[in-house]
Amino acid sequence: MSGSIDDVTVSEIAIWQSRGYVAPLGLFKLVNIEGGGTLREDVGAAWTALAQSIAKKGGTIAGPYGDTKRPLMQTTSVGASKYSFHIIGRAIDLNQGLGDPKGQRYFILQETSGGVTWWRIYCKTDDQKGSQGFKVAKGVTQAYRFGDGQLYKIPEGYYLDLTAEIEGGGLFERIHAQSGWTASGPGYRKSEWWHFQWVPDKQPTFQDECELVGITERQLRDAGYKDADLDHIPG
């Protein structure tokens, strides 16, 4: 495309019209999801289907969610990125309360690879008589306890490997803990055990991702993003 109205431009427009193409700006709508929050429409549909599938197996990824879509931002809290996939509706944070000791459903297992920490979530199933999940024997499997940083043995019972369930279809992925996650206080926010994000068709720049959900360059610049920010890798 030359930018001028010539035969090539007219031909290209005809192709777009015949094939139903639309401009990338606002290609995806944002939708509300059950459990609270907003995601990109394709992400939201896939997450809803996944939640239903996991529920049938006795697990849960139901809300209320810690975070879904965030606004544009320059001043970020500890562990948050101004290029986050949350800003464009591609990421969701699980209900961290399900990892609390009282009524605990989530048990967080620490995995280390190449000096980087990852997390695997075991979810206690609804039915503890053996019809759902797999059995974990007493005193066998260790989980990580945030707060005092101690390892402890998870109770005997039946569990789903929630991380495997979420990642199994190849549409969502976990992320590793950020550097400094072991620090007391704000370091917890860098652990990221609750964060999952949409895998397909990641765009090369933050601006590209923003435009797909209708965030314009002008809005980005008004929010304080500079040239280098617009070209930054999203995430």
Image (tube, helix red, strand yellow):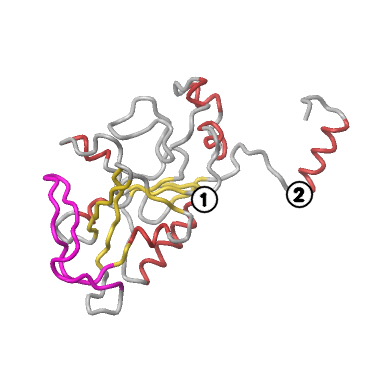
Say if 226 sits above or below 160 in the image. above
Residue 78 image-quadrant placement: top left
Q: How many numbered marks, from 0 up?
A: 2
| Residue visible at 24% across and 34% down in the picture | 180
Q: Position of residue 26 (x, y in %)?
A: 59, 39
Q: Is residue 148 magenta?
A: yes
Q: List the residue tagged with mark 2.
A: 19
Say which amino acid is labelled 2. Answer: Arg
Q: Is residue 231 left or right of residue 155?
A: right
Q: List the residue tagged with mark 1.
A: 41
| Residue visible at 80% across and 44% down in the picture | 15
Q: Residues within 10 Å of mark 1 (few under 14, many from 20)?
A: some
Q: Position of residue 19 (x, y in %)?
A: 76, 49
| Residue visible at 12% across and 49% down in the picture | 150
Q: Nearer the viewer, residue 159 or 69?
A: 159
Label 2 element class: helix
Residue 84 image-quadrant placement: top left
Q: Give the extent of the magenta segment.
A: 133-159
Q: Position of residue 74 (x, y in %)?
A: 38, 25
Say which amino acid is labelled 1. Answer: Glu
Query: What numbered label is drawn on residue 14?
Result: none
Q: Position of residue 113 (x, y in %)?
A: 32, 47
| Residue visible at 14% across and 61% down in the picture | 153
Mark-to-mark CA distance, 2 and 1: 21 Å
> Closer to the N terminus: mark 2 or mark 1?
2
